[in-house]
């Protein structure tokens, strides 16, 4: 299997990434939300300077793809006018913070904003580009356990804890201020104890797995609250949760949703938007771009951009995933990856189809880059034999 290039950093609005379909800009809204005005503006900018779609990422960020060098200045200017730019590329890269998108508590915004201030302070070490923080303090369950993060601020009962990813226990803290201080101290320990390799990469879970021991003043003995039920689209407690196939929102559809919204729109890491306290799904019922029920087959498939949009992909992915979605059993999941990196679904999946120069490899219950069960499968064969991925013992 061809080894893909791992960049070790993510694009930003001030530091775009070159891809096969042009530049990628990633917008990182604070507190996982955008105003109605920002939704209109982002949709217009994606239509004018991108490929006409706004992409929801699995970090609750937004991306605009297909941007040309000629269109980049106007796009950047437009984002600045919407208040969507940070001061510098360095500050933007440091603010790798994800918050529970369904928050209604007072602790979440206080912690997230104080953490953002601390991460851009002069005393912070250079952390890896993908090193991130999760603020998961919205209620009696943890929502972000399956979302990539290196340091997690969570709840245990009604108390706050700070936990290193990969550690079973977190350190109990007495206040939001102490939670931020311990999280920053844990990040500083990670860097000082060799968590960052010579190439500037590193993750907390891997650091602990190699034998690093958290110092006693940062270690804890408290387990976080239980994990929440999986996020599903639909109506819950008066709020609309609307998902999108592969996280792609056509610009015109985002406009339509902004027309219906009465308050800030929440972004989720599950390729969905949440409209708190609103029945937006009823307003836009039966729209073909929207997934508003939990039994939609497209929720059972994940696929990256694929070829030709990504230069590392060996095949087109999303049309294949869409065609196979109806054949994925309820409760299972199919990941179609353009290369062995598996960007769209980094963890194991019941079934993964990984594109290679010699066709697709089929992998069960493992990751996109793991040893395959079958190799050399053509897209035509998969489409004419959609039950093939269920036929293995």
Image (cartoon, rainbow, N blue to C red):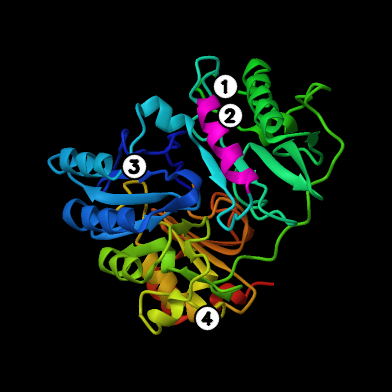
Badge 1 vs badge 4, beta-carbon distance below 8 Å: no
Disc nearer the start of the sequence (3/2): 3
Residue span colored magenta: 106-119
Query: Predominant secondary structure in magenta?
Result: helix
The residue positioned 43% from the left and 64% from the top of the image is 246
Disc nearer the start of the sequence (2/1): 1
Q: Residues within 10 Å of mark 1 (few under 14, many from 20)?
A: few
Looking at the rendered structure, the number of numbered marks drawn on it comes to: 4
Badge 2 vs badge 4, beta-carbon distance below 8 Å: no
The residue positioned 58% from the left and 69% from the top of the image is 333
The Cα–Cα distance between marks 2 and 1, rounded to whole angstroms, is: 6 Å
Q: Residues within 10 Å of mark 4 (few under 14, many from 20)?
A: some
Q: Residues within 10 Å of mark 3 (few under 14, many from 20)?
A: some
Query: Residue beneath label 1, please?
Result: 197
Identify the secondary structure beneath mark 1: loop
Query: Residue beneath label 3, please?
Result: 84
Disc nearer the start of the sequence (2/4): 2
Give the camera-side residue of 36 and 60.
Answer: 36
Query: Residue beneath label 4, please?
Result: 327
Closest to the camera, between mark 3 and mark 4, is 3
Q: Quadrant of residue 140?
A: bottom right
Query: Residue beneath label 2, please?
Result: 202
Badge 3 vs badge 2, beta-carbon distance below 8 Å: no
Badge 2 vs badge 1, beta-carbon distance below 8 Å: yes
Disc nearer the start of the sequence (3/4): 3
Look at the picture and state if 9 lies above or below 272: above
């Amino acid at each position: 299997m061809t080894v893909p290039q791992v960049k070790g950093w993510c694009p930003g609005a001030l530091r775009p990434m070159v891809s096969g379909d042009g530049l990628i800009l990633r917008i990182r809204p604070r507190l996982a939300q955008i105003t109605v005005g920002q939704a209109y503006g982002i949709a217009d900018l994606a239509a004018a300077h991108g490929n006409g779609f706004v992409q929801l990422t699995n970090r609750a960020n937004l991306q605009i793809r297909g941007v040309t060098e000629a269109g980049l200045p106007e796009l950047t200017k437009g984002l600045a006018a919407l208040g969507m730019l940070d001061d510098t590329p360095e500050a933007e890269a440091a603010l790798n913070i994800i918050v529970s998108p369904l928050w209604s508590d007072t602790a979440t915004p206080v912690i997230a904003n104080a953490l953002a201030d601390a991460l851009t302070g002069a005393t912070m070490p250079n952390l890896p580009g993908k090193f991130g923080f999760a603020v998961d303090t919205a209620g009696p369950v943890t929502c972000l356990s399956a979302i990539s993060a290196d340091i997690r601020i969570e709840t245990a009962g009604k108390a706050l804890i700070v936990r290193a990813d990969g550690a079973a226990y977190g350190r109990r803290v007495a206040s939001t201020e102490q939670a931020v201080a311990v999280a920053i101290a844990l990040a500083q320990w990670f860097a000082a104890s060799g968590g960052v390799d010579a190439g500037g990469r590193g993750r907390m879970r891997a650091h602990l797995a190699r034998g690093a021991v958290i110092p006693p003043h940062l270690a804890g003995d408290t387990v976080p609250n239980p994990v929440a039920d999986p996020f599903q689209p639909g109506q819950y407690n008066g709020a609309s949760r609307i998902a999108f196939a592969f996280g792609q929102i056509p610009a015109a559809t985002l406009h339509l949703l902004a027309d219906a919204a009465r308050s800030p729109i929440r972004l989720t890491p599950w390729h969905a938007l949440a409209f708190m306290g609103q029945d937006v799904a009823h307003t836009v019922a039966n729209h073909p771009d929207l997934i508003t029920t939990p039994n939609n087959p497209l929720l059972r498939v994940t696929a990256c951009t694929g070829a030709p949009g990504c230069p590392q992909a060996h095949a087109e992915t999303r049309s294949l995933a869409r065609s196979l979605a109806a054949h994925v059993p309820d409760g299972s999941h199919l990941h179609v990856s353009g290369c062995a990196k598996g960007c769209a679904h980094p963890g194991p999946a019941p079934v993964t189809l990984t594109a290679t120069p010699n066709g697709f490899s089929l992998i069960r219950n493992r990751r996109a880059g793991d040893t395959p069960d079958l190799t050399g499968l053509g897209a035509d064969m998969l489409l004419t034999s959609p039950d093939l991925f269920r036929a293995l013992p």
